Image (spheres, grey):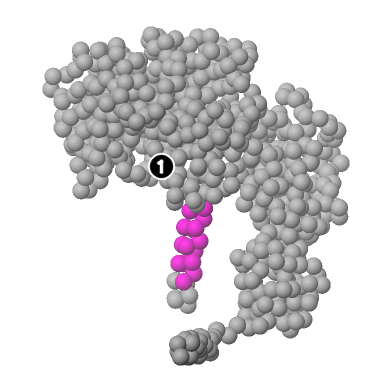
């Protein structure tokens, strides 16, 4: 099927799910109202949770620091709304666990002006200052992974960054947030690129955009600042092109080695919405307190792209925009990599890029899973050239070690292409997620046991 | 003539190799205590790991090396353990029998599912999809990973989708403790009859919407308990088993029956004040 790589400007394999973007891509970003109670989990990003610095009952201003970073791989949290800290305790999250967080009650008649902080000047600030500024602004990858951006931007010793890739691909069906950001916030994006070029030391910046967003590419090309080395590259439509490694292959034609980051081939990839956020927040020293989210799907009455405060409860969002009565499934994120929600009381977090609502008509219940017929469709779909078919069989028998050593399970980034094409409806990605979790759990246990053994040895020597 | 050469050559080779083998056997012989094999024969050979050793053979080695005591083997019968103890001439080292206990009582008749889960039929798999759809964040998902993990058939799922442990069959190997993604199982000595069958960490009656037998952290059990037997920690009663815990006083005023006293048959006795729930079928959303 893919002996010939017809699309030279893309990666091999991948799939073409229906885009379903037409309904929201023309709708401008609109401000969403403030919910009466904002729920802020402290673990909205990958890494250590933020540490709360406010007290219960304290009045906070919009943009005020609520929690400081809990370590290097962590970011602070800012108040998305002026109000009062009602309670510090357990809050529900998308992970299905209660984690520490803040319940913030909004002042209904506040003007909701945002607090300004120490600005970071793009012309005079050193790269270290900019990195610190990015961390202080609480910026994480807004594409969905929510990895602290300042960690990603730190070029390790001995490596150089040649190209800064701005990810405006947005390959997930339904989502149009990056599309709208590119059309409406070009000045912020270019300002963000200015910061990022300085931090990474890259010679040029390439904005990668899929061919279904030609208007955004045209718009950005028209407004390109003459003093910055930025180019816009239009790529053929393919899922999962928005994945970091796939985008590097599509733009630079180089493959990122297994278990390595794009810096290995001299590239750093940053999401376009993250870039815009850096360009908007750093000149004012503000913190991130809202983000653009696409609300779409057949069950939504007022579809659109909304600027929603972080921490807005999902139930408030759905009640406000109106949903179909036969609402059956709600996704946070895109349909391919997003998570089905089991509880509507969870809040929007920094990493939420979309809310999708499906009704009884679209959702197929009680899907029967058939045994693997070894057709190889998943092998042709996997963008990382893994063997999902064999891994699925191994996962069923819990042969996790073999999956890691012989089939490179840990490279899988759970794009969902294999599950999408599987004619037997095997939930392959779920199996892989489960396997990865078990492997990580076991590794952690082994590490702990080894540390304990070491400690015992030391104690014996001392005794 | 040629046949003679062949016989001599092969015969010589045979002798040479035989001598080699005999010397190797003598020189490289590792003496192993013959009692290890005999003790291993006396063990149940379940290789469950409940004793803390990787299997029955390493346990037998440890027994003969007097590193551990026969009482550690929870799978053997009393006679079996006694036989090993008298064979080796060591103490029995009787440990109190432990069983696996579930810290949740939220079956489908009392607890609701906020969402219907579709996917791999296992708790571990369900827990990955935003917690698995159970109303309570801490509660049992009921797909029976523990039942599958139990090598002794001691766990069965009841009609309400809750695992029931047969204390007779349970060997306290700890497999179910590992299997549960919500960490609801723990190994408890059988004498620990006073038991909190809930892991909800939220205070207040809001949880009753999700589960009618949840602990609401009202603290009555802690008040009624003699001395420091029960303390409220993290909105859950924690029983200090080093005190005298053979009392049913603390359970009497519990409004939901989250704290129970286990009778001899392993059944849970609830307090007088706890709400009686006679629903047999599934609890619908919104019903109280």
Image coordinates for residue A104, horizontal then vertical, percent: 50, 27
Would residue B251 be found to the left or right of residue A62 on screen? right
Front position in the image: A225 or B126: B126
Q: Is residue A452 magenta?
A: yes
The 10 Å Cα crowd at callout 1, few under 14, some 14 to 19, many 20 or more, is some
Q: Quadrant of residue B257?
A: top right
Give the residue at mark 1. Answer: A411
Image coordinates for residue A406, horizontal then vertical, percent: 44, 49
Front position in the image: B132 or A189: B132
Q: Residue at x 24, y 32 (%)?
A: A252
Q: Quadrant of residue A96?
A: top right
Residue A349 visible from this viewpoint? no
Image coordinates for residue B276, horizontal then vertical, percent: 85, 35
Magenta residues (range): A441-457
Q: Residue at x 62, y 80 (%)?
A: B65
Q: Residue at x 47, y 77 (%)?
A: A463
Would residue A206 be found to the left or right of residue A307 on screen? left
Front position in the image: A286 or A411: A411
Prevailing SS of the magenta stretch: helix
Residue A452 visible from this viewpoint? yes
């Amino acid at each position: 099927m893919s002996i010939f790589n017809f699309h030279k400007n893309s990666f091999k394999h991948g799939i073409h799910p229906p885009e379903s973007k037409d309904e929201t891509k023309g709708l401008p970003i609109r401000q969403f109202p403030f919910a009466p109670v904002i729920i802020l989990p402290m673990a909205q990003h990958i890494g250590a949770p933020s540490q709360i610095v406010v007290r219960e009952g304290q009045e906070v201003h919009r943009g005020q620091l609520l929690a400081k970073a809990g370590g290097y791989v962590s970011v602070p949290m800012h108040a998305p709304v002026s109000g009062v800290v009602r309670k510090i305790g357990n809050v529900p999250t998308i992970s299905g666990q209660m984690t520490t967080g803040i319940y913030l009650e909004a002042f209904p008649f506040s003007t909701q002006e945002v607090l300004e902080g120490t600005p970071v000047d793009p012309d005079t600030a050193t790269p270290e200052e900019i990195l610190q500024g990015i961390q202080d602004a609480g910026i994480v990858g807004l594409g969905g992974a929510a990895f602290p951006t300042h960690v990603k931007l730190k070029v390790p010793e001995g490596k150089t960054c040649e190209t800064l890739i701005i990810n405006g691909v947005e390959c997930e069906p339904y989502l149009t947030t990056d599309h709208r950001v590119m059309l409406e916030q070009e000045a912020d994006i270019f300002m963000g690129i200015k910061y990022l070029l300085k931090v990474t030391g890259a010679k040029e910046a390439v904005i990668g955009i899929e061919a279904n967003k030609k208007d955004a590419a045209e718009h950005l090309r028209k407004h390109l600042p003459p003093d910055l080395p930025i180019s816009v590259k239009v790529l053929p439509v393919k899922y999962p092109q928005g994945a970091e490694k796939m985008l590097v292959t599509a733009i630079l034609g180089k493959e990122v080695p297994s278990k390595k980051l794009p810096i290995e081939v001299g590239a750093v990839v940053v999401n376009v919405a993250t870039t815009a956020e850096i360009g908007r927040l750093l000149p004012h020293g503000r913190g991130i307190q809202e983000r653009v989210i696409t609300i779409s799907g057949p069950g939504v009455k007022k579809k659109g792209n909304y600027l929603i405060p972080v921490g807005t409860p999902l139930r408030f969002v759905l009640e406000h925009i109106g949903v179909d009565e036969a609402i059956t499934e709600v996704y946070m994120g895109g349909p391919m990599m997003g998570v089905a929600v089991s509880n509507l009381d969870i809040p929007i977090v920094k990493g939420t890029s979309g809310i999708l609502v499906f009704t009884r008509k679209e959702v197929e219940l009680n899907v029967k899973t058939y045994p693997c017929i070894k057709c190889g469709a998943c092998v042709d779909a996997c963008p990382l050239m893994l063997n999902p078919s064999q891994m699925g069989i191994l996962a069923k028998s819990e042969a996790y070690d073999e999956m890691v050593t012989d089939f490179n399970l840990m490279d899988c980034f759970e794009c969902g292409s294999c599950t999408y094409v599987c004619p037997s409806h095997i939930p392959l990605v779920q199996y892989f997620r489960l396997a990865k979790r078990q492997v990580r759990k076991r590794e952690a246990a082994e590490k702990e046991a080894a540390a304990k053994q070491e400690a015992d040895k030391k104690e014996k020597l001392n005794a | 003539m040629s046949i003679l050469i062949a016989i001599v050559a092969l015969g010589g080779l045979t002798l040479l190799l035989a001598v080699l083998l005999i010397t190797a056997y003598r020189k490289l012989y590792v003496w192993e205590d013959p009692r290890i094999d005999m003790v291993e024969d006396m063990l149940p050979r379940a290789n469950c790991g409940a004793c803390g050793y990787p299997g029955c053979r390493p346990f037998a080695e440890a027994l003969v090396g007097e590193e551990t005591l026969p009482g550690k083997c929870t799978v053997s019968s009393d006679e079996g353990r006694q036989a090993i103890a008298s064979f080796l001439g060591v103490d029995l080292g009787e440990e109190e029998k432990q069983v696996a206990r579930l810290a949740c009582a939220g079956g489908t008749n009392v607890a609701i599912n906020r969402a219907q889960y579709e996917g791999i039929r296992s708790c571990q798999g369900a827990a990955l999809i935003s917690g698995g759809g159970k109303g309570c964040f801490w509660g049992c998902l009921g797909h029976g990973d523990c039942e599958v993990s139990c090598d002794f058939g001691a766990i069965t799922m009841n009609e309400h989708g809750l695992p029931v442990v047969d204390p007779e069959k349970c060997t306290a190997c700890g497999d179910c403790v590992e299997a549960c993604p919500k960490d609801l199982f723990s190994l408890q000595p059988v004498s620990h009859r006073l038991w909190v069958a809930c892991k909800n960490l939220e205070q207040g009656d809001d949880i009753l919407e999700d589960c009618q037998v949840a602990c609401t952290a009202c603290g009555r059990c802690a008040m009624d308990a003699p001395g420091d037997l029960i303390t409220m920690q993290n909105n859950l009663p924690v029983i200090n088993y080093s005190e005298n815990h053979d009392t049913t006083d603390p359970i009497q005023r519990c409004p939901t029956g989250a704290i129970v006293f286990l009778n001899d048959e392993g059944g849970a006795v609830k307090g007088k004040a706890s709400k009686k729930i006679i629903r047999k079928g599934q609890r619908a959303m919104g019903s109280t």
